[in-house]
Image (cartoon, rainbow, N blue to C red):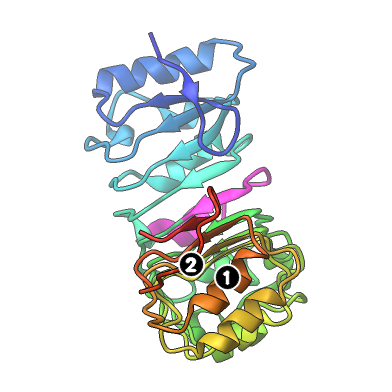
Amino acid sequence: MFTQVAGTYTTAAQIMCSEYSEQLVAQLFEFLQQQKIALPISLNFSGLEHNICNSSIQLSQLQIFCVTELDLSYTNQNLAHIVKTFATKLKSLILIQSQRQSEFDQLFRLTLDQLKYLNVSNNKFQEHQLDYIIGKKSALQLVLLDLSYCDLTDSDLRKYSVNCTKSIESLNLSGNFISAEFLRSFLSQKVFPVLQELFLSNNILENVSFLFKMVLKKLQLQKSVQKVNFENLVQALVNIKELKWIDLSFNEFGSGAEDGISQLLNKVDFLDVRGCGVENVSERKGAILMK
């Protein structure tokens, strides 16, 4: 009855529920409640229009332990009630552009001991709500955190807690209003000791001095470093020893950037310079995207 396909972050079997009727959602929950399923399940309710909590389902009476991934993006669902039902084993939670941002503080007060992957992109946080995600009020130990396109500023991120950031390996801050000066202290190894992947697309950065002491494997700076001196950018990137994947696309570097691009090509396995005005660089198959 319920189709199983590959999950997003783990090997969970994914069930797409976005167009399920109230009756079918109720049947699904009953199925998950009754079956002794060993395989982890991913539930995707993204865009679901009717409210799960208004159906015949009594969420407070359910105990479902097989759900490890939950997507409630673009919905008006009662977040805390739904997440609480699956909290015991939940590893991945996606809340892109939620219509219930006002419930975030209540939601993240829940005990989410197993949660490792959190995507809250395209949400506008109310005052102090970030405290429950990366601040002193948070008990989360995340591996991946996506805060992209949340209109965050330096002051929004200043109240971080190292207890929350110390486990993060992948961080997405794209599409915000964060200064390079703040990033210099915020992205230090003391704050993010195991960070390997950083996404900073669509931020207007004045310099890249924050990169010089970083240890990264993957870096995305799409449309972010047009105001940065190109030689300084190349030097900073070359100095990151473990860096193997770089996205510099849609930064207009202009003529004279070819030597620097060639220098980066000798270092990394993948380089994206589409829309950068770069020409006459010998392409290495699988390593560079220019068009």
Label placed on residue 262: 1
Q: Mark 2 points at which residue?
A: 281
Classify residue 84 as left or right of residue 77: right
Quadrant in which the N terminus is drawn:
top left
Q: In which quarter of the image is the C terminus?
A: bottom left
- Of labels 2 and 1, earlier in sequence is 1
- Percent across and percent down for residue 55 are 28, 27
Q: What element carries label 1?
A: helix
Q: Judge whether 41 appears above or below 123 on screen.
A: above
Where is residue 9 shown, x and y percent of the image?
Answer: 56, 39
Asked whether 273 or 14 is in front, the reply is 273
Range of magenta residues: 103-119
Q: Does the magenta stretch include residue 87?
A: no
Spatial CA distance of label 2 from label 1 is 7 Å
**Visible in this render: residue 104?**
yes
Q: Where is residue 84 in the image (x, y as percent from the top left)?
A: 52, 40
**265 shown above or below 31:** below
| Residue 111 visible somewhere in the drawing | no
Q: How many labels does the image show?
A: 2
Q: Are marks 2 and 1 in contact (CB under 8 Å)?
A: yes
Q: Residues within 10 Å of mark 1 (few under 14, many from 20)?
A: some
Instruction: Please name the residue shown 38% across and 64% down the image.
Output: 274
Q: What residue type is labelled 1?
A: Ser
Q: Which amino acid does label 2 sit on?
A: Val
In this rendering, position of residue 213 left or right of residue 135: right
Query: Tag 2's secondary structure?
Result: loop
